[in-house]
Image: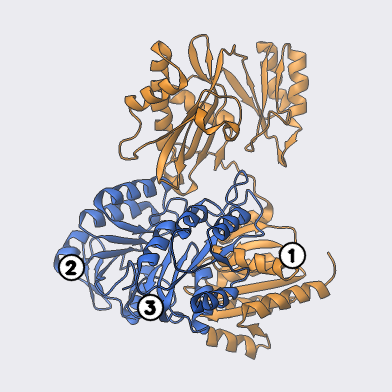
Amino acid sequence: MAIIITEETRIVVQGITGNQGRFHTGKMLEYGSKVVAGVSPGKGGTEVLGVPVFNTVQEAVKITGANTSILFIPAPFVLDAALEAMEAGIKTIVIISEHVPLHDALKIMRVAQAYGVTVVGPNTFGVISPGIAKVGIMPNTIYQKGPVGIVARSGTLSYQIAYELTRAGLGQSTVVGLGGDRVVGLSLAEVILSLARDDETQGIVVVGEIGGTAEEEAAEVIRHINKPVVAFIAGKTAPPGKRMGHAGAIIERGRGTYQSKIDALWNAGALIAEVPWEVPVLMKSALVK
Amino acid sequence: MKLFEYQVKKIMREFGILVPQGEVFFDLEQAKNHLEKVGEGVVKAQVLTGGRGKAGGVKIFSNPAEGFKLAEAILKMTIKGERVRAILIEEKIPIEQELYLSIFVDGRIKKPVIIASKAGGVDIEDVPEEEILKLPVDPLIGVRNYHGNIVAQKLGLSGDLGKQLTALLINLYRIFETYQAELVEINPLVISREKLIAADGKMTVDDDARFRWPGDLPFNEEKTPLEKRAEEIGVSFVELDGNIAVMANGAGITMATLDLIAYFGGRPKNFMDAGGGANAEQMAKALDLLISTNPRAILINIFGGITRCDEVAKAYLTVKQQREITVPVVIRLVGTNEDIGVKMLQEAGVESFSSLREAVIKAVELARVGGDN
């Protein structure tokens, strides 16, 4: 059945007339995603790659039945766009945009909670259920339908690992990018729980990184599920106090270290890959058992 | 970005929070007259790092000559690798009690949280859980009187002090919102002559909300020349102490690349995330920067998603045409337009790898051949 993105997913692209929006609309269509609408205030009535463009999300939802939105919106305007989508009845929002103000993210998550909306990101590469659809910016070519769910905090690193899995003959059920910011919607623990309940998923790969406590919280969930979990954590050699690219990737006051995450995951029963190419090896042996 | 104490206190004063009288000085000469005028007080080093008290960056003086000596010494100090850029000279206030109060963004529960404790003046990390109040705030509601009542009760403040606390807390939240803070902290919040006074102040503001900060806040964080250059190019860069320069695309994969270099016995010289969708020109500049650091080897690890492998190849060939590259470069290319990129490099006689493992091993090997430093 896959999670978050299913056969029922009907996508509206907010910011469809921008460079990124237009480019990735094309890639999503190529992948077979049902992109049913675009929104760009003032450009209503036009088309992008055959997709009808509307002035408001409300119109887009009413006319096309869109239920999932993906945002290619400049950071200062993301709050407005996300609130508009939620009020218009969108149930899943994927926020690709980077540098969304932290306080805006707080408001988005609070309203999403009130409206019962699932938010992925900000600063995420999106979600893909191989063979079904993708709502995101990941490359189309590296995935294959299969039994492994992946949840990642980082885009390119997750591509690397999906690529290793695919080459080893292990396809994926759903791949979820959480986003690299300090405040994001779906948490690592929540996605692991959803994958644990998903019929199509037999094993779960966690691609984590230093900073924050997401992996430690996820360990509490992993302890109680009966599917194998393989984890790879980036940042073993990162110096404390330095922000490693992502806003959330920083060791502060001795917290968020590689060791703390590895210990928590290991103690919860996860298998730890020391290098990315160990992930498929560990997963294969765990799935055979 | 972190703010200096004097900046925080200026903001607090503007928002109606009581702070000790004080003035900031960036050099000794300016401070001299002021010291003569006040006679006694406290000299406080202005640094962004914590733990300055233990390092001797806060000293009391009881006459101008002593103040001058302390000011001179503190201005020359380096605390945890950070040079002291200014001193704050403040009045010394009588302290009846020290409390702790802060508001920060908790990414775990996705809400601002008020932290309050009777145990002020010490690192809040060292205070036992049961002595700390953690009160989440709904960002759609903000801080209101009832939050003040809850916090005042925990701090044992009643009557007028309780009212002062509520007003202060509401003002602190206004600062938190206005400056889009990740953290505002008063430690200690002191009771002095029946008034609540912020004896110290810390603040971290969200760089992504810079466009909302009122007025102009100066750029506080000192960057090395290389970090400045990287910022201008638009890549994320951290200097490390090894000898293999690294460029990759994406924070996670860049970190993993550094880890892999260490795994195979090498030492990375930097973190450089060229980001998604960097173009050839930007990459060429970034590569130029790496060459200028004189590494033993350069490892370029690209998993093309938005980033196109042909752009990466083009960047490398551009730089190679413009200048002689004497340092060995290992390029790993996979993903979007991989075949085109690899072919471009091949035609120019440059070898590239598709296996990450092999590329890292090669870079470590080359760095070793290059010498021992």
- The residue under label 2 is A65
Q: Regarding mark 3 in the picture, which secondary structure is present there?
A: loop
> Numbered disc 1: what chain?
B
Classify 10 Å Cα crowding around label 3: few (below 14), some (14-19), many (20 and above): many
Q: Nearer the viewer, mark 3 or mark 1?
A: 3
Mark 1 Cα-neighbour bin, 10 Å: few <14, some 14–19, many ≥20 = many
- Colour chain B appears in: orange
Residue type, numbered disc 2? Gly
Q: What amino acid type should be assigned to the residue bearing mark 3?
A: Pro
What's the mark number on residue B267? Answer: 1
Which quadrant holds residue B272? bottom right
Q: Which residue is mark 3?
A: A130
Secondary element under disc 2, as helix, strand or loop, is loop
Q: Amino acid at mark 1?
A: Arg
Q: Position of residue B321 (x, y in %)?
A: 67, 79
In the rendered structure, the answer to whether residue B217 lies left or right of residue B227 reads left
Question: Label 3: chain?
Answer: A
Measured as percent of width and height from the top left, residue B239 is found at 68, 57
Image point (40%, 16%), residue name: B162
Instruction: Please say whether residue B62 is visible from this viewpoint.
Output: yes
